[in-house]
Image: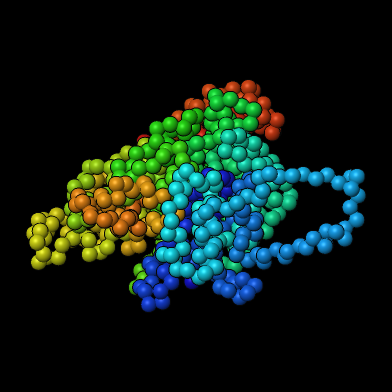
Amino acid sequence: MVREVLTFQLGHYANHVGTHWWNIQESSFNYDPLAEPSDIDHAVLYREGATRQQQTTFTPRLLMVDLAGTLRHLPQTGDLYSDPPEPTSDSQHQDIPWDLAKLQTIYSHGGPCQPHPYQTDLRAAQAAAATAAEEVPKEYDFAQTARGWVDYSYTRFHPRSINIIERYAYSPDECQFDTVPHGSLFWQDGDFRETLTDRTRQYVEECDQCQGFQLLFDCGDAFGGLATSLLEHLQDEYGKTSLVFPVFSPNPAMFKGADEATSDSIRTINTALTFAQLPERCSLFAPLATMEHCWRRMATPRVFPHATYDPRNLYQTAAILAAFLDTVTLQYRLRAVGGATVGHLAGICSDLAEHGRRMVAASLALPFAMDASQDLIDCLDQNEGEQLMVPLSPAANVGTRGVVQSVCMRGIPENRLKRPPTAKGAQRQQRMAGYRCGSVSEMLQLFFSCTLPVSMSHVTASRTPLQVNQPFPIEMFVPVDRFTHDGFLTQEHLGQPAGVVSVPTLAALQSSTGVGDGLETLHHEARRVRLARIPRFTEAGLEAGEFNEALEHLLELKGKYDDGYEL
């Protein structure tokens, strides 16, 4: 029986991340009936349907929200089920009795919004029924040319997936949808709330065994208020597990009518208000950012030893967060093979949220640094005492003691685990404790038990690597002659490298006493702001007492990460 999960994406940057996430998943679809079945159950996040022409479709079980102007050439109902508009003849217009004295003519020199060249080529290839390898052979330089997530979206959506807030227009330079109280007030809008909740109900009713919800949302603006209001509805209406990822844009727009310092203060207050409400409204939440500091200022980009990216580019940074999401969620997306027990969304949340620790930290290795000539046992032995992953949660300090974590490894074949007993070099490996391990997950489990004192780890492994086909920013893996096509490191100079098409990755959700340090710094930064100097909060109904109460909730959550906690 399918264990469905419904996904929500709220906000422009969240939709950048989500777009890469769905692209990654669809690039791993295998349409060869003779190929070995994937160990990933794509039906967990996708639904099967049919168009009016009875063509079978497979679309994300998704509800996304963004501001006006972000869809550009894409219809709000998507382009999969919609019929093309019928042409209107000039004679029809001539029959209308216009009052020329009252007629106003407006000329637009820009013309209609033209799709990105990738979208034009993609639709042409789909119309010609081209194979995936033939659809987009060109280079598009998305990092410089993509103006929004629509430009590099490969996925086609169900008509109910896209929801646009027409009242506020998107601008990369100025944010109008500004505060958490504004987002909460907007949720009270009857038409929007009714539409979104009805579409949620339709998705849930289609499920055989709905595990729950996963939600990405922009943190730092009004989408925080919209997200917490939606979570309250989901909790009251369905009572199912919800795994939440607040995402922080590395290049946020300044707020309308505010200078840089005031914009930083607004974002800090919004984050504090959001984090104060999340523990009561979701099962678990993990803040995601490619910047180390996000509370007041966006600073100190995370460094990935074998990946290069522009730290302010939304297209590239969103791909990193999407790689984390696609990997860490494998625990509840894998198939039950050979009678093995499959993971559930409720399990991962309950294991990590013991004693009310509803906030966890995220970490990622992209790619997992393993030489093409190495076995996993040698790679782990070489890295003992080193940090395998890069943190992806702002101001998080997981540490190495008392860690409770859910880890997912992908892309390491079983034949790369260790040498056979008769092979060259096996005698040296046999002296290691890890040689007794019979699987990737078992070996990683042993590694963490030895390197993280007084800790608990749940390890999931998948043979399916992370697909990094276009439109994923494969330019991050440079120089290309230092990587094999499947993303392993090599010291050999390849004559004509074919390019990286997949990479092994390692991702984790982690809880420890150090995670509370980020909450303490957030409380400190928010307490410094004088609410009376930012009237837009009080105008939206936020009172000083409510703000102080939110700060107290932050301290209460921080207290649950104190050293008195016992495993």
**Residue 272 shows up from this direction:** yes
320 left or right of 209 in image: left
In the foreground, 281 or 104: 104
In the foreground, 159 or 501: 501
In the foreground, 101 or 519: 101
Residue 9: x %, y % from top left: 56, 51
Q: Residue furthest bottom?
A: 34
| Res 341 → quadrant | bottom left
Residue positioned 32% across, 38% down in the render: 399
Residue 56: x %, y % from top left: 56, 73
Residue positioned 63% across, 66% down in the render: 81
Residue positioned 65% across, 56% down in the render: 76
385 left or right of 174 in image: left
Residue 112: x %, y % from top left: 66, 50
- Number of marks present in the image shown: 0
**Residue 215 shows up from this direction:** no
* 521 to 187, vertically: above or below: above
* 250 to 42, vertically: above or below: above
Residue 283: x %, y % from top left: 50, 50
